[in-house]
Image: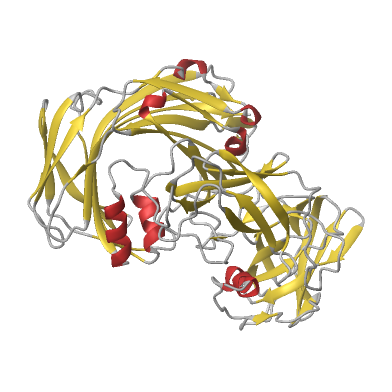
Amino acid sequence: MNPLRLFRYLCLLTLAAGPALAQQPNVALIVNAASNVRPGLPNSPIAEGAMFVIYGSTLGPSNIVVANSFPLKTDLAGTSIKVTVGSTTVNAIMYYTLATQVAAILPSSTPPGSGTLTVTYNGQTSAAAPIVVVRNNIGLFTINQAGSGEGVVTLADYSYVSATNAANPGEVVILWATGLGPVTFDETQAAPGGDLTNVPLEVFIGGKPATVLYRGRNTCCSSLDQINVQVPPGVTGCVVPITLKIGNLVSNTETMAVAAGGRQCTPTNPGVSQADLQRLLAKGSYTAGGIALVRTSTTTTTNIPPLPPTTTVTKSDVGGASFFKISGNATAAFNSQIDVTTFGSCVVSTFSGQGANPLAGLTVQSLDAGASLGVSGPSGSRTLPKQTAGGFIIYSATLGDATPGNYIDLGQYTVTGNGGADIGSFTARITVPPALVWTNQASITSVTRANGQTVTWTGGDPAGYVTITGTSFVGTSATSFVGATFTCTAKTSDGSFTVPAVVLLALPASGSITSGTIAVPIPGTLGITGAGATTAFQATGLDIGGASSQVSIFQTVTYQ
């Protein structure tokens, strides 16, 4: 693909026209055009020379107007943007304008610091909105335009890297981004190119450092950064994370496919074969079912001054299942719902409001497998009744008796379904292995993000895998907040994993919510899950089905 066409695709794919009303423009959100990281998170500032997007209302005309030729202007179809930091005010360089969103380049001459931004449309100017400007803060473009999931990564011939066009270790790939930092040329003109060797850019692919061969503007455009890197040796998988770091600011996480040889990647999830991947991708849309028996233990420490801290431990044994049809981006659906990230690596996702939506960008249809499912095992028989949650059909129940956490023990379990409107009858078998034990849990009450954090364990299923997860968020109320979550994947046999600083620095430091005169701390969470081996099961109407057990251990921690 031609880089100029690529740039237009990246910036324009998700635009939707909206009405332009004769009223004052309203600025609701300012984000990096690639990462979409929201204000309040540590990697949300806008870099000098970066493309940024403003969301709101009455920002421009009802039909999109795009600057299709150089030189770019500071006024486009009646829309202009001013950014003020300290005593300096600059005019942003417009790329497109629309009633609900506009995109522009923040001039490299903008001084770093906290400032304000205003949008003027047809003579009416918005209220000043806060903006933080930094020298460098890179954002990676992704296929879904949301800043997560599959990355816009190309081979040297500009063909997209995908599950069926995977990169190989040692091969050079191109990452597409914005926010490397300021330049000295005229940003209203196409970039002359040039390696920005003064930018201390670090690239991590599959958790390993990658050799950077070029980092600079692509000559098609003005703010589009092209980063040429060499895939590290020993990295393979269909979901290989990529994270960039400049100083203490890290990019959003995107993923790519890497094959040991050839162009077809191999799934990391031990319960999914390469043949499964080929079959599902060939279908484009497919049906899948998942069954899990999950034992969870959560240790929560509550600290509300002036009361002394209290610690409670909650345990539960839960059974759950869901069946669905996924259409849209088949590879993205496979990555997010069936495969796992390559062992030894981590992904980070951000969220706001009530939480992240892992199915964003996909069309998901819930499927009916009958009125209930049956579970039988060493401790007797249970029922998973059909329920509806958020418009989706799920099968779920607490399996323990009076004391939760006393049903899912070592042994053999069987889950059966008589079939429903969409899914036929089936029998799925699950072997619950020795439980995973988090051996250094008691010693971790706080996490210093810049230092990384090691987690150790024993037990678990050698044929399964382990995930380490953590979440931190900041906000003003229970429904108004932003946060970030990381998930790292390791082999059970590894026994330990160190979550690196490049991952933890994407999380905000733990904050608090003020209630009256009392500041109530908001703790983050850290956890470890041992996933047992996945057993395949079949049913009419189902393209792929898997059943497994999990042991999850979580606790509250303070991120510093």
Above or below: residue 271 compared with residue 433: below
- Residue 172 lies in quadrant: bottom right
Question: Could you say which is closer to the camera, residue 385 or residue 503?
Answer: 503
Q: Residue sitting at 37 percent across and 49 percent down?
A: 266
For residue 342, side relative to residue 412 (left or right): right
Q: Position of residue 111 (x, y in %)?
A: 86, 53
For residue 37, side relative to residue 291 (left or right): right
Q: Residue sitting at 77 percent across and 61 percent down?
A: 117
Q: Position of residue 106 (x, y in %)?
A: 78, 62
Above or below: residue 133 compared with residue 26: above
Above or below: residue 262 compared with residue 382: below
- Is residue 236 visible to the viewer in this orientation of the structure? yes
- Is residue 394 visible to the viewer in this orientation of the structure? no
The C terminus - image quarter = top right
For residue 71, side relative to residue 350 (left or right): right
Question: Could you say which is closer to the camera, residue 428 or residue 398?
Answer: 428
Give the tally of numbered discs.
0
Taking the view exactly as shown, the residue that stands out farthest to the right is 87
Q: Residue sitting at 66 percent across and 55 percent down?
A: 227
- Residue 331 lies in quadrant: bottom left
The N terminus - image quarter = bottom right
Q: Residue sitting at 31 percent across and 40 percent down?
A: 270
- Residue 287 lies in quadrant: bottom left
Q: Position of residue 482 (x, y in %)?
A: 57, 47
Question: Could you say which is closer to the camera, residue 162 or residue 150?
Answer: 162
Q: Position of residue 474 (x, y in %)?
A: 59, 41
